[in-house]
Amino acid sequence: MLRVLRTKDLVHAIATFQDGLHPDVLPPTRLLRCVRLRRGSYERQLAAVHDCLKPWLARHGTSSLGLFPASLHRHLFYYAVVYSNLDVLVFLDTAGPVRLSAVDWALVVDVGHLDVLRFFLDRHYDGGDERVMAHAIETGAVAAVQCLFAHGILPAKDALNEACTNGHAHVARFLHAHGLGAWDPNTLMFVLVHGHLDVLRFLLDAGLGDFDASATFGFHVSHLEMAAKCGHLDVVQYLAARDRRHVPQAFLEAARSGHVAIVRFLDDGESVDVSVAAQEAVVRGHRDVVAYLVQAHAAALDMHALATLAASRKRRAMHALLLQHTHPSTL
């Protein structure tokens, strides 16, 4: 009797009559259960699921997804969103629409499948509102912004400023072209500080380049000076090509801040004050700037005075460098 119960055929026959999953769905469901919801990295987690489920769906069709337990429907939702499988989304929509959280909507935007975004918007899923638009603007998903706008979803008033501050020129152009979002001139300051060159080009071309530094800082500072101070060489090159009037001040800002590449670029040998720049670099300990100025303008610099300044600031390495270029008679 014991031997009979252990036979393979009998055990299989008994199992066939038990409630459970159809043998055909076991491989994909096992993989789906390995996906940890709300943990992010869905693309990585779902790769193995896709390798199994894609041929499975081709063989069985989405109607066979009804064999899957309802507890895996949200797993299927993430799979469909990540891999842009509208057939699976249609099945889920028919079986009982999945409720999308703010995180889910953000995922839809982030993966970038417009057909998936349109699917939810066309069916008026809850949560497809200005918050999704705000996320699309913040992350620079211009196609999603356009899609949301086409579905009647408008951005917040600060949308244009948000796009510019985050460096999304394409989004900023779209918003400006459609008169969306109020412009705050102070945003230009953040664009310069962060070095968003494409946004800066757009703003200047659109006539949005005015920024009252005096009202904000209490003193005047040019666009070029701000870019030089923050170390954005590409922005400095762009602005200097447009207007070189502020090169001397920007040169000093770059020296003070230790941006040797910008110092080298702005050094025209005529309008810039290399002596003051060297002093500023010594005081702030920017050895590479001092080394460049010494190499390029040794004859114009008072090496002894700079060496004395370096010693007073306890800049030993810089002091040693300057002593190498100090004439013995001045020691």
Image (cartoon, helix red, strand yellow):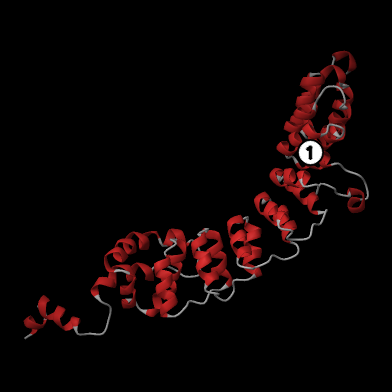
321 lies above or below 189: above
Residue 103 is at least partly visible in this image: yes
Residue behind mark 1:
228
Residue 22 place in picture, x, y as percent: 25, 76
Quarter the C terminus occupies = top right
- Which residue occupies 89% across, 30% down? 276
User: For this view, does 155 lie left or right of residue 83?
Assistant: right
Residue 28 place in picture, x, y as percent: 32, 68
User: For this view, does 246 lie left or right of residue 84?
Assistant: right
At numbered mark 1, what does the secondary structure look like: helix, strand or loop? helix
- Which residue occupies 77% across, 34% down? 286
Asked whether 51 or 85 is in front, the reply is 85
Quarter the N terminus occupies = bottom left
- Locate residue 201: give its quadrant: top right
- Which residue occupies 44% across, 76% down? 93
Residue 305 place in picture, x, y as percent: 89, 25
Asked whether 9 or 268 is in front, the reply is 268
| Count of numbered tags | 1
95 lies above or below 103: below
23 lies above or below 331: below
Quick one: label 1, few (<14), some, or many (20+) residues within 10 Å? many
- Locate residue 20: give its quadrant: bottom left
Asked whether 200 or 289 is in front, the reply is 200
- Locate residue 134: give its quadrant: bottom right
Residue 227 place in picture, x, y as percent: 78, 41
Query: At label 1, which amino acid type do we have?
Result: Ala
Residue 166 is at least partly visible in this image: no
Asked whether 293 or 177 is in front, the reply is 177
User: For this view, does 329 lie left or right of residue 173?
Assistant: right
